[in-house]
Amino acid sequence: MDAEHTPPLFRPTEGGYRWDGVAYQPYKQDGSAPFKDISRQTLFHDPSLGCELRYFEMDAAGYSTLERHEHTHAVMILRGHGQCMLGDRVVDVKPHDLITIPSWTWHQFRATDAEPLGFLCMVNTLRDRPALPTDEELAAMRANPDVARFLGG
Amino acid sequence: MDAEHTPPLFRPTEGGYRWDGVAYQPYKQDGSAPFKDISRQTLFHDPSLGCELRYFEMDAAGYSTLERHEHTHAVMILRGHGQCMLGDRVVDVKPHDLITIPSWTWHQFRATDAEPLGFLCMVNTLRDRPALPTDEELAAMRANPDVARFLGG
């Protein structure tokens, strides 16, 4: 990388879970979006590292996309409280909890109605694209009462 | 991995920057140790990920090893305040600051005298071993007044 494209080695937080020189990427939202009020910031993306570290944040009552994929996620909650659906389990999460999302496991995060939920997610830089559930897969998930309660509606 | 060796998918924090089922590894210390009052916990070590995520913590007035290596570190401060030496720079650090430590850059972290300093460090799973400075290299570093003040003594 030439100097112009070398990221700074030190990025202070600006406070409020934003970082100096890190792009804030709200997810584009329309009526059919499978997520709600969530943003991504890629904290580390370095060609010499096999992984990226991203920070995702949902507003109160927001949620991430319900999806699965071949690649693994390694997650640490950084702020707020909420729930994580992890296959057939639903767990309450709080700051500094660790969650491993294995290959091809359906997963979704939801913030409580009271506060934003933010988490770090380490992921291989080279990875496959997520798959969304079909109506049949969603119906099968909802057969689990804990999952049905988590998914709501 | 067989079931016995599969790590749990959800590891709640026990509070106090410790995690359920994560080994706490204090660095063995004797008179000649090049570090002081520091521990490591490997939060994620998954064969499907190219990186590990570790949590290092120094007690108040503690410091990490002054070292360099081919591999890159991606660091996020998680708790406390202190300083980081990064080549010929010394920067004050606080929670959520991000630091990239490039290949072959001398680096060290120091906690203030007032409180522990803890940080996350993402690193390639396959990496080289760190090198310690020779007396000549240390003398050359100390020619920089900021670095000399940081290293003390």
Image (cartoon, coloured by chain):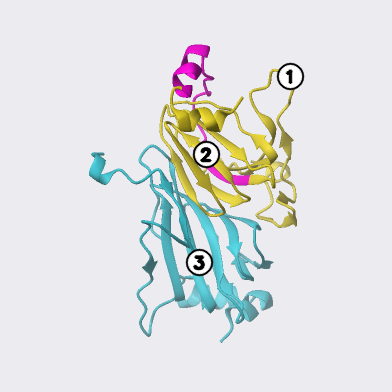
Chain colours: A yellow, B cyan
What amino acid type is highlighted by mark number 1? Answer: Gly
- Inspect the magenta stretch and tell me whether residue A8 lies in it: no
**Residue bearing the label numbered 1:** A31
Q: Which residue is rendered at x = 51% and y = 55% of the image? A: B121
Is residue A74 something that shows in the picture? Answer: no
Crowding around mark 1 (Cα neighbors within 10 Å: few <14, some 14 to 19, many 20+) is few
What is the number of the mark on residue B16? 3
Asked if badge 3 and badge 2 are on a common chain, one would say no
Tell me which corner region of the image, top left, top right, bottom left or bottom right, holds residue A104. Answer: top left
Tell me which corner region of the image, top left, top right, bottom left or bottom right, holds residue A56. Answer: top right
Q: Which residue is rendered at x = 75% and y = 51% of the image? A: A20
Is residue B15 something that shows in the picture? Answer: yes
| Residue nearer the viewer, B68 or A121 | A121
Magenta-highlighted residues: A118-142
The image quadrant where one finds the N terminus of chain A is top right
Identify the chain of the residue marked 2, using the numbered disc in the image: A
The image quadrant where one finds the C terminus of chain A is top right
Q: CA distance from mark 1 to mark 3?
A: 42 Å
Residue A135 rendering spot, x and y as whole percentages: 52, 13
Residue B53 rendering spot, x and y as whole percentages: 47, 51
Q: Which residue is rendered at x = 72% and y = 50% of the image? A: A19
- Is label 2 in a helix, a strand or a loop? strand
Identify the chain of the residue marked 1, using the numbered disc in the image: A
Identify the chain of the residue marked 3, using the numbered disc in the image: B
Q: Is B142 drawn above or below residue B72 in the view shown?
A: below
- Inspect the magenta stretch and tell me whether residue A134 lies in it: yes
**Residue bearing the label numbered 2:** A84
Crowding around mark 3 (Cα neighbors within 10 Å: few <14, some 14 to 19, many 20+) is few
